[in-house]
Amino acid sequence: MTEDILYSIRNLTVEYRTRAGSVQAVDNVSLDIRRGEILGLVGESGCGKSTLGKALMRLHTGPARITNGELWFDGRDLMTLSDREMPDVRGAEIGMVFQDPMTSLNPVQKILDHLTETIHTHEPETSAAAARTRAEELVERLGIRRERLNEYPHQMSGGMRQRVMISLALALRAKLVIADEPTTSLDVIVEAKFLDLLRELQKEFGLTILLITHNIGVVAEVADRVAVMYAARMVEVGDVRDVFADPKHPYTQGLLRSVPNIKLDGGELYKMDGAPPSLLHPPKGCRFHPRCPFAMGICSVEEPSLDAVENDHLASCWLYRDVAVKQEARNG
Amino acid sequence: MSPIAIIALIIGIPSLLLLAYVFVRGSTGLRRYILTRIVLTLPMIFILATMVFFILRILPGDPVSSALGPKGTPEMIQSIRTQLGLNDPLIVQYGRFLWSMVTLRFGNSLVGGHRPIVDEMSERFPATLELIVPASILALLVGVYGGALAAAKRKRALDFSLRIYSVVIYSLPIFWFGLVLQLFFGVRLRWLPISGRIDAVIGTSLKTITNIYSLDALLTGNWPAFFSVLQHLILPTLTLGLILSGVFVRMTRINVIETMQADYIAAARARGIRERVLIYGHALKNAMIPVITLIGLQVAILLAGAVLTETVFSWPGMGSYLVERISARDYTAVQSVITVFAMLVALISLAVDVIYSLVDPRVRY
Amino acid sequence: MAKTKERPSEALPEGATWEVELKRIGFVRRILTARHWYGADWWFVTISTVAVVVFIIIALFPGLFAPYSPDALVGPSFLAPGASVDLPVLIVPQSSTVNKLQDLAVPESADRPTVAVEQGLPTAGALNEESQKIDEVIKNQPGGLRLRPIIDRYASLEETLQAVVDGKDKAAVVQTTEFNKVKAQFPTLREAAPVSGTAATAGGFLMGTNDIGQDVFSRLLWGTRIALIIGFSSSIISLLLGVPLGLLAGFAGGTFDRLLSLLMDSLYAFPGLILAIAITAVLGPSMFNIIVAISVLYIPTYYRIVRGQTLSVKEEVYIEAARSIGARQLEILRRYIFPNVIPSVAIIFSVNVADAILTGAGLSFLGLGLPPTLADWGIDVARGQRFIQTAWWMITFPGLAIMLVVLAFTLMGEGLMEIFNPKLRER
Ligand SMILES: Nc1ncnc2c1ncn2[C@@H]1O[C@H](COP(=O)(O)OP(=O)(O)OP(=O)(O)O)[C@@H](O)[C@H]1O
Ligand SMILES: [Mg+2]
C-alpha cells in the first residue's frame, strides 16, 4: 500500500560548527512523513531529534547549517526556497510546538498579540477584528476561555501555555505540526489531557504531526508510526505496533526493554550498557556497535543502510542482511 | 516662586501622578515592589551623604583657614569657625548636616557674597538639567538604535564598526572630545558658539522663570533667545550624549543578541515572523528591560561627564559650580553640591526602577 | 576531593558542548583556537597588547624617545607642528667684513663687540648660547681671540637695526622672516650667516610647541609615565582592597555582607569623578592623593565581581563538599574560588587601569590633582584650552595620547574577556 507522503526527507545532514570541531547532529537521514499520521520520533537525549525537527523548517541559525539533503514538502523542495520565501512556509504550512512552553512565549507580548501577529504576518489583509475573532474561536476550541487572551504568558499555567503554543501552530491551518517534546515539562495528568487533545485535533483538522519525544510511552499512546534515532542516524522506522511488538534494531530492543510500563517479556528493568558516543568523534561503522550485544566483525567496519526488513518496517542493522550483501559491502 | 520650586513642580507633579496611577492600576506585588524601592533609596542617599560629610571632616585640612588664606588671623578663623558651628562636637555637626539635608537648607556659602547656597544652586541646577536631559535622550537614541542595528548585522562590517565606535567613544576623555568639537565646529568652521548658555546680548532680553532657558524662551515666546539657546546647547549635548551613547550601543547590542537566542524568538521565527520584526519588535523590546536597569548605573557616567562638559563649555551648571567652589575652598557649598548629586543619583535610579516595573509585565502584575 | 564522579549518560544541554570541549583542551591550545574562533578579537588583543607594552616602555624610559626635556623652553611659543623655526640671523652693515658670528671675535684686551637684539625674543638666548660655544673653541686656539659680545636690547625691530646702521652696534641678531619684511627700509644692511643656538637648531617640532615654547611631543612622552603611574598604582590598590573584601563578604554572608554590599553599591552608583574631586580637594593636590582618591572609586568593581563569583562557587562547592570529605575553607578558596576569580580579576584590572587613567586625566584637567607645571596630559589639555583659537595642536595631541592609552587597555581587557571567560563574555 503506497501512502500519500506529505514530507519526504532525503539524505539530510545538519552540522554544528563548534569551537572544538564540527558536529554532524543529523547525519544522512532519510524519512517519510505520511499525510494525516502521527509519527513519533524517539531517541536518547542528544541524538539529534530537535535538530532534525528544526531542520524541517530550515530554522537553524548561528552555528548550525544544513550541509546536505532534500526536503520535499507537499511537492516542492524547501531547500530550493530562498531565505525570503521560507518564512511564508513557516507557521502557515508547517507549525511547531516547542519543548518548554514556559520560555517559548514572548514574555512582554499578550497571548492575543501572539495569535494576531501570526495571522497578520501571513494574511496581512485580515482585519484586526476578524483576526481577534479567529483567535478567540481557536483558543476556545482548545479549552482556554477567551478572556484569558488578554493575559501575559507568565500568568498562565504550563498546560495552558502549551495549548496556546498549539493554537499558534494551528492558527493558519498548518498541514504539518512538529511537536518537540511538547509534554516533557508537564505533569502526568496534564500530559494525558494534552495528548488526548492532540489526537482529537489530528482527527478534526486532518493534521499530520511529527511528535518528537524521548518518552516511549507517549509514542505508544498516540503515534501511528515511529522512527528511532541513534547518534544522529535513523536506525529503525515502522508502524508502532510492528516496532513495539517486534523491534528489529538492537538499540530499539534495548530502548523498549528499558521502559518500565511497556510489557515486553515481563522481565525486570533493563539498563543498556555504555553511553551514547560523542558526535564529535562517532565510532566507525554502525554507531551502535560498541554497545551492541550482537556486534559482528562487519559492524565496526561498514555502516548498514536503512532498508526494509519486513513490509513497511525499516531498520539499519547487519543482522538482517544476507551474507552475500555483507560480503559485497565488505569488498566494495 | 523660585525657579527651583517651579522645576520641582514640573518634574514632581507628573511623577506623582504616574506613581498614583501605578498604585491604583497595579497589583499588590507591584505596589509592594515600588514601596520597597522607595524605602531602599533613603539609605543610599544617607550613606552617600554620610560618606561625603566624613570625607570632608576627617581628612586633614581646615576649610576656614584655607578659605581665608594668608590674611586670616587665628582670631578671625576661630570666630568664623564658631559662627559656622565647626567647633561643635562632630556628632552635633553631623546631626545638623543631616537636618540640613532633610530640610534642603544648606546654609550660606563661605565665600563671595555669603549667599544662601540654595539660591546659588537654584540658578545652577536648571542649567545642568537643560544639559543632561537632551544628552541622555541623544545617548539613548544613538545607543538603542545603534545597538539593535549592530545585533541585526551581527559579525558583519556594520556590527564591527559599531563595536569599534563604542570602544573608541568609551576611551575618549570627555573634556577632550568637547574641545575637539569646539575646535572643529567653533573655531574652524565658526558654525556654533563654544561657551555659555545663551548669546550675551540676546540673553538680556530673556525673562527667566524656571532658569531652564529653552523652556523659558518657549514660555515667553522669545524666539531669538530660543534659537540662541539651542545653538549653545548643540555642542555640549553632542559631547555628553555621544560619550554616553557608546555604553548604550554596547549594552543594547549584547542584550539583543542574547535575547535573539531565546526560545520564544525561535518560536516566533517558526511562526514565519520576519527577521526584521524579530529583532526590532520582539528582541529589542525584551532586551530593553535589562538595558533599562543598566541605564540606572550609567547615571554615574552621566553626572561625572556633566561636570567635565560644563567646565569645558563654561556652562554655569552644578558641575562647574562644584569646581569653582572647590577652587575657592568653600566647603559648605562643596558638601551641599555633592549631597545634591547623591540625591540625584538615588532619585534617577529610583525612577529607572519604577519605569522598569512598568515596562516588564512580569513585575507589573 | 574525590575524583569527578561518573556522569550518567546524559547529553549536554543544547549549545553547551563547545564550552565543555573548551575546558578539556589546554590553556595554550585555547589561545591558539581563540585565534581561529575570534578572528577580530584575537587581533584586537594582540595589537593592543603590543601597544600596552610600547606605552609601558615609553613610560619607563621617556628620556630615550623624547628629543627634549619636558620642562625645557626649547623653541618659540605656539610653533605649529612641523613648521620650521624662524632662524635668528646675523645682520651686519653692507661694508662689514663680518660673515659669521665668529668673525666678531677680538683679542682679549680689546673692547668686547656689541650686538643688538630685540627685547623679549629668543634671539638673545640663541646669541648667548652660540657665542659661548664658539668661545669654548677659540679660547684654546692661538691668537688669543675671545668672543664675548655685549648684548644691547632694543624695544623694536626697527630700533635694533637702526643701531647697527648708526654704528652703535657691530651687528644685530634678528629673526630671518622679520628682517625680510623690513629689508627695504635698511638698504645698508645685509644678512650674514644664521646664528643657531639650541633653540634654533630644531628644524620644526613634530607636534609643535606650547605657549611658553616647550616641545609638545616631549611633554607627551613624559606624560605617559604619569598616566601609567596613576593608572597602575590606583588599580593595584583597589584590587588589593576590593578582592579580599569581596571574598570576605561572599564567605561570611549575613549582616556583614549586606552592610558592606550596601556601602559598595552606593559607592559604585555614585559618579566617581565627583567623589574623587571631593577627596582630592580635601587632601590637596599631589600625585599620591590623586592615586588614593581614584583607588577608592574602583574598590567596588572588584568587590562586586569577586563576591558574586565567590557566592556562586560556594554554592556549587558546598553541595559537592557535603558528599566528600569536608574540604577546608582554605582548600575551597585555593582550588575553586581562585581559579574562577583570577581570570576575571585580571580582565577587570586591565579595564580598570583604563578607567583610572581617564579619571586621573579628568581630575588634572580640572586642575585638581597635580602641580600645574607637571608634564601631564590632562594638565596640558587644560592649558591648551586657553589657546584654543590659535594652537589646535596643544589640545589635540595630549588628548589623543589619553585616548590611545585608554583604548589599548580597554581593548586588551575586552578582547581577553571575549576569549577567556565565556561567562563574562558579552556583558
Ligand atoms: N547550538 C549548538 N551548538 C553546538 N552543538 C549543538 C548545538 N545544539 C545542539 N548541539 C549538539 O547537537 C546534538 C543534537 O542535539 P539535539 O538538541 O538535536 O538533541 P535532542 O535529540 O533534541 O536531545 P534532547 O532530547 O535533549 O532534546 C547534541 O549532541 C548537541 O551536543
Ligand atoms: Mg531536543
Image (tube, coloured by chain):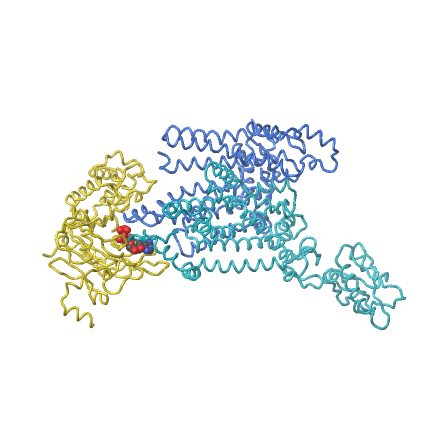
Chain colours: A yellow, B blue, C cyan
Residue B1 located left or right of residue C122? left
Asked if residue B139 is positioned above or below residue C25 in the image, the reply reads: above
Asked if residue A83 shows in the view, the reply is no
The x, y position of residue C419, in whole percent, is 44, 56
Between A293 and A244, the one lying in front of the other is A293
Asked if residue C322 shows in the view, the reply is yes
Q: Quadrant of residue C139?
A: bottom right
Between B105 and C25, the one lying in front of the other is C25
Q: Quadrant of the C terminus of chain B?
A: top left
The x, y position of residue C147, in whole percent, is 83, 66
Between C340 and A226, the one lying in front of the other is C340
Q: Residue at x 33, y 50 (%)?
A: B275
Residue B131 located left or right of residue A124? right
Q: Quadrant of the N terminus of chain B?
A: top right
In the displayed image of the protein, which residue is found farthest to the front?
A: C325
Q: Quadrant of residue B67?
A: top right
Between C89 and B177, the one lying in front of the other is B177
Asked if residue C5 is positioned above or below residue C95 in the image, the reply reads: above
Q: Quadrant of ligand 1?
A: bottom left
Residue C260 located left or right of residue C20? right
The x, y position of residue A137, in whole percent, is 21, 38
